[in-house]
Image (cartoon, rainbow, N blue to C red):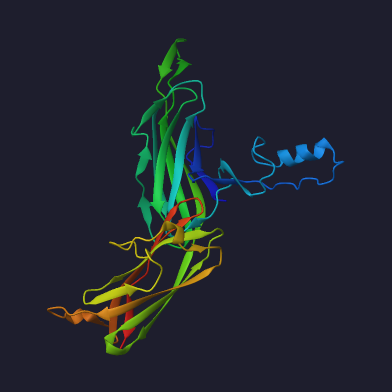
Amino acid sequence: MPRERAVSEVKESHSISLKVLRLSRPSLSEQHSLPKATSPSHSPELDELARQSHAYPSHSTDDPFILSPLLTLPPAFGNAYIGETFSCCLSANNETAAMITGVRISAEMQTPSLTLNLELGGDERQTADLDPAMSLQKIVKYDLKEEGSHILAVTVTYTEAPKRVDSDEGEREEVAGRVRTFRKLYQFIAQQCLTVRTKIGALSGGRAILEAQLENMGDGPISLEMVNMGTKRGWVATSLNWQGSTGRGGDQGDPKNTPMLGSRDVMQVAFLVCPEEIEEKGEEDAGPNDKKILGQLSIEWRSACGDRGYLSTGRLGLHV
């Protein structure tokens, strides 16, 4: 669960409350069916219990399958993985009986290496006037690229409703509302979903073989949609994996053949990398310490709920 911290300029309650809800795709609800009694003298209560053990009582109690057709939302914040898009709904709610004007939401993401102001989608209004019980909602999205602690900082600014106070002459005067602001911090940890270990070996004729070991470090299964080797100029790669693995050009395979990796499952992929004839061979083909740069490995996957993930390795090379 993310940890929440609040920072305010005064120690008094605010007229606006802030709710931060993570946006997640639904998953299929699970049902654990009770076994039906086989004795001819069983009581009707047993049949009723078997029916109530299903996610939707009107379904047939003869179906023991654990997944039901019903959708369910995650019960908690869940895990945040590198390569996926972190999405949240920011909702500023008017908790008073008067109109609140000039309500504005801004957000920034603090990662282990930088602090970035985030663009907010959803409601097109930059500022809003909120009647009682109304809200201003914004959507924030951020592609997670670093491992470690992240802090989502949300700032809300608003103007309180004007107040009528007694003056020195005994008359009631209207006083303009104060401009107030508060800031809340939500901390969460981004962790690896897919780890990649690579190995490059030299073959005859200047060719090379790239092997990569992919391990699912997440809590749930993922489906590998693409594993592609993007080569540097002067090299060409041939996939030695399943049909449709590169997701490029005419390499279109059957989606039913997409590999599935359960939690802690490991899969091996390989590419044959060959030199190609080019008109001019640049001096940059050889890197430091006589290392030939071949290219980069790109991987795309989807989680059990359909969220897309993407990972690209650094430049891979062959020592000569």
Residue 206: percent from the left, percent from the top? 27, 86
In the depicted structure, whether residue 97 falls above or below residue 116: above
Q: Nearer the viewer, residue 249 or 297?
A: 249
Residue 246: percent from the left, percent from the top? 35, 65
Tell me if residue 42 can be seen: yes
Quarter of the figure with the C terminus: bottom left
Tell me if residue 192 can be seen: no
Q: Nearer the viewer, residue 1 or 29?
A: 29
Q: Residue at x 70, y 46 (%)?
A: 33
In the depicted structure, whether residue 156 falls above or below residue 313: above
Residue 69: percent from the left, percent from the top? 57, 42
Q: Residue at x 29, y 62 (%)?
A: 250
Residue 109: percent from the left, percent from the top? 41, 51
In the depicted structure, whether residue 284 falls above or below residue 113: below
Q: Nearer the viewer, residue 257 or 73?
A: 257
* Residue 105 figure quarter: top left
In the displayed image of the protein, which residue is found farthest to the right? 41
Q: Residue at x 27, y 88 (%)?
A: 205
